[in-house]
Each structure stands twice: as structure tokens, then as C-alpha cells.
Image (cartoon, rainbow, N blue to C red):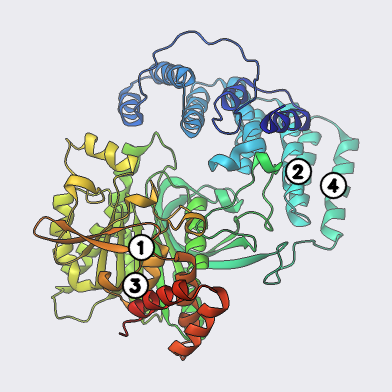
Amino acid sequence: MPTKCRYCRLLISHWIEPFSEIEIFMLRHLRAALAGCVIATASIAQQDTTAFDPITFELAYSAAETSQERRDILQAALARINAAPDPEIGLYFDLNLLLIDELEISGELAQAALIATQLAQFAVRQGAEFGIDAIAQISRAVRLAEAAGDYPLALRLRESEFAYRQDGGQSGEELARVWEKTADLAGRMGQTDEVTRLQAAAEALRAAPASSPTRKAGDDGGFREVDVYYATDRARSGLSEPSEMYGSGRGELEYGTLRVTIPNVHVPGAIEAPSIWRLEFSENPARHVILQSVTPLESRAFFSKMQAEMEGRESKEAFVFIHGFNVRFDAAAKRAAQLAHDMNYRGVPVLYSWPSAGKTVSYVADTAVVRLSGRRLATFLEELHAQSGAETIHIVAHSMGNRALTDALELLASRRSARELDEPLFGQIFFAAPDVDAGLFAEMTKAIRPLAERMTLYTSRQDWALVTSRKLHGNAPRAGQAGDSLLQEPHFDTVDMSDLGEDMLAHSYFANDSSALVDIMALLWRNADPRRRCGLEPIEAGAGTAWVYEKGQCNVAMIMGLIAFAWQNKDADIAEIRELIARYMTDPAKAAEIEDRFVSILGED
């Protein structure tokens, strides 16, 4: 029997609940995971199998005037995806969430609760593989079950939440709160003995000593904590769970801090999540990247805390990360923490999160909110410069987040009447795959240039969101696209990062030399010219020169390690660097090559 078939048998035996219709669909289409396994499912009628276009769907869905029309559009979209030979599971999940919303609007709460429960079951078992938060899905299903008066279903869901949290290593207060909520449901059902039992269990959990993996560095069973400052104009959801505290609605500018745990077994460039093929069914900080806490702060307390932290740091600098399209607050928090961790960043990491809906089918909706966020981002960046205590502030924006950033920076440049010879407000500014009109970007960055020490444009031929955006905008090139429309201007450096795939910030450089992080580190550390940076080769672009990143041109992991060492040990000389290289690289020729590349970044010939 093929190995993956054995995995299928293990998984099926592990799951007590029967597969829901939604789960059967998900399992049928797990391409790599189910290779070699045959799971019997009901036959599906022939459907239109033309490619599903999320933006065309979103425009039609938004234009529908009645809930029934929207449900018809949803059902047709689900049928098309269901019939496709290679469907996108995240898309199918997002469409079912929209269907739940429509059912709730029309008062069909029992049906909405049923679908929400099916989604929650899938999320518990495999949601982390697709960036789906299980606790959020359980909470939605519980709320709908309660609204429908189905308390037995709500109680079973709470029990599922308890098991999920317990399997993930949670204890004490977190589990006690779940039992208290379960006791409330039991009370509504008139189960007084069960109420007493659950309340006693909650008190026992609070009294028990907390257990958690050790935090010792180098221990494969432990994890590291990364604290990130954040600003957001998302509205609060009213939920206390860290991953659900901020939703996709528009709000006022808020500040706070968050904590993310990153396991010691972390592979740089990755966001580890539970894997069904490792028989991991819930998050565990010793194995997975987890958003542990979110603490909102008043503006004055936020900047006072940051100033105090800056005073205690040798490197008084910060970097601000601005996420792109289809990103939830919790996913943005994990990415900001992962970037800081993997770069061994010596300054303070900061996240700016705008109210993206976090859905593949909400591209147009995201475009409607991101421009307003640009105004809020401008306010935040001004405050950060004036009140943080940072001597240098770097900025990294990705995808649609560049619309907010370019608007914010143009506004700041106008307010300050910025000129070329002025002292720059910021250090490095990185525009990663910007979903901005190329012509507009070229003009805006002329005004923005005096604000930065250096500006770098990362482009790609692989980004599907940019391809889709170009179609939506009358085939007008996007600034983040490489290829024939590659944008090159004298006031910023252009680097074609197509070798890295769809997301230059997400792919694992440790495994295959494929990350922009080494380039970002070289710029943060030494403001290195492209000619001196690792893996960049010059190409002709228009009337000037751009650069293309070529995988395999340098030992990325080693270079990043050396930069991190030099960053931390400012007095280290080249002899110490040479000794460090020799310790890990026994081949003299390769050691000499790495030394040459490092010295090039260092700026010493």
C-alpha cells in the first residue's frame, strides 16, 4: 500500500466525526496530500469548468440587489469550483463563508449553523494548512448554533474547541474559559449536574500549575517570543481571542503590542502551521508560529513604551511592515514577527495593518479601503518619526499595501515640501510587488524620493494578483510586474525577484536560496549598492539598468548569518568573520567566495 494511503487510513481512523459534504470536497482535491488514496464520494454532475475568475465573481456578487440573487451566484460559483480538476481550496472556503452570511441575513440560521459547523470541523482537522483559524471558525459556528436555538450542537462545538486547545498545549485560564462557556450552554439546556461539573473543572484548571514548552535557546522543544508594536485602522471585532480581536471593518487608528511565538525548529522564511501529514491537529508553540497575545494601548502609552525600549537598545531603529491584499490581522502579525526573527533584526519591529477582508474573493473590496488607510498611515508615520525615539525607520510594504504607503509618503512629502537635499525622514523603503499603476508609481516616487535614504522596487513575473489587477485596470502595467513592462527609474533601484515565485517574502530561502530577506538585510545593515549585493545581476531596462536576482549565486543562509553576526558585534573585524566562515565552510574555495561576497556587501575592497 502506498505510504500516503497509510496516512489516509491513519487520518480516517483518527477522526471520530463523519466527513461533512464540505470536507469530502476538500479531501477530494488535496492534490499532493491524497496522491495514491481513493476516497469514495458522491458523483458530481457535469458543470461549467471554465476558469473561475475571483474578480468577475466579486463584481457580479456586489451588483446583485437581493440576497437570493447573491445566493444563486454563490451556488453557481461553488458548483464551478467543485467541478474543476484543480480547484483552490481557500477560494471554496471563502465562498462558503459568504454563503453563511447570506443565510444569516435571510434568517436561515439552522442551515447557516450547519455549514459553519462543517467549516469548523475542517478547520480543526486541517485548516492551518490553508491559513484558516480553527478557533475563529468554531466561534462562528457556536454563535450561529446558539442563535438557531441548537444548544446541543453549540455544546459539542465547545467540547471540540476544548480538545483542540488542549491538544495544542494550552492550559489554565484559556481552557477554564472554554469550560465556563460550555457550562453556560449546559445551563440553558437545564443540565444542572453538568453545569456543576464543568464549573468545578474550570476552577481546577485555574488552580493547576501552568505548563508550557521551555523557552531555552537551542532546545528543539522550545520557542522564542517576538514582540511587535502595531498600528491599525481595523475595527475591533468584539472578540477576545488574539487572532480574532481585529476584523475587516473600518475603524479608527489604534495602537498596541502583540506577541508571536516562533518555535526553535523554525525554518527561516516559513510560517509553520499544523500539518495533517505529521498528524498535528492543533497549534503548539514548540512546533508552530502562533499569535499569542494582542494588547491595545492608548497612543501616549504606546509611544512611551517604545521610547523606553529604544533607550535600552544599542540599535535605535525600527522597521514598519505593511501587508498586502487578502491578509488577516493575525496573518500579518505572524509575518511581521517572522521577518524580524529571521533577519535577527536588532531594532524594533512594527506592523501597520489596514482592513483587508482576508479573502481571495474580496480584491475589489480591499481596493476600496486601502486608500483611506493611506491617510491614517501618513499620520502614524509622522507620529512614529516624532515620538518613537528611533533614529532610523525603515519601511517594507507588500502588494496592495503599497497603495497605502505611496499615498502616505506622497502626502508627507507634500506637507514637508520635501526636497532632494533634505535630511531623509526614513532609511530604506522597500516596495515589494506593488499593486500600483506603473506610470503613477513612477511619478509619485519622484516626490517621495527625498524622504528616503534609498528606495528599492522588487518586481515579479509570478504574482497572480498583479496579473489579475492588470486585467482589471485595462491592461495597464502594474509597478510590481517584471518582464516587458519592468519599471526602471533613476530615483529607485529595480530588482526582478521572479526566481522566488509568487511571494518573495514567504518562500523558504533556507531550503533553496530563494528569499529577498538577504537583500533586505544587506540594505538595512550597510545601505549596499546593488552592485555590491549578493545574487544580483545587471540587466538593461529602458534607458537604464535594473537588476535580476538569480538563485544559487551565493550561499544565502551563510551570508545572512554573517550579516546577523556583524550586526550584533559592531566591533568585529574581517579576521573574526574569516574565522567564522572557516568554522562552517571546510572547502577553501567556497570559503573564499563567501568572504568575497560578504566583503563586497561590507563595502571594503
Disc with the residue nearer the chain's start (2 vs 3)? 2
Q: Quick one: SS at disc 2?
A: helix
Q: Which amino acid type is marked by label 1?
A: Val
Q: Residues within 10 Å of mark 2 (few under 14, many from 20)?
A: many
Q: For this view, does 605 lie left or right of residue 152?
A: left
Nearer to us: label 4 or label 3: 3
At 80% across and 29% down in the image, what residue appears?
189
Disc with the residue nearer the chain's start (2 vs 1)? 2
105 vs 92, nearest the viewer: 92
Disc with the residue nearer the chain's start (1 vs 4)? 4
316 vs 345, nearest the viewer: 345
- Label disc, if present, on residue 396 of the rendered structure: 1
Q: Which amino acid type is marked by label 3?
A: Leu
At 47% across and 69% down in the image, what residue appears?
343
Location of residue 48 by image quarter: top left
Q: CA distance from mark 1 to mark 4?
A: 48 Å
Q: CA distance from mark 2 to mark 1?
A: 38 Å
Residue, disc 4: 199
Q: In what quadrant of the picture does the N terminus appear?
A: top right
**Where residue 8 sits in the image (x, y, percent)?**
70, 29
Residue, disc 3: 523
Q: Which amino acid type is marked by label 2?
A: Phe
At 20% across and 38% down in the image, what residue appears?
473
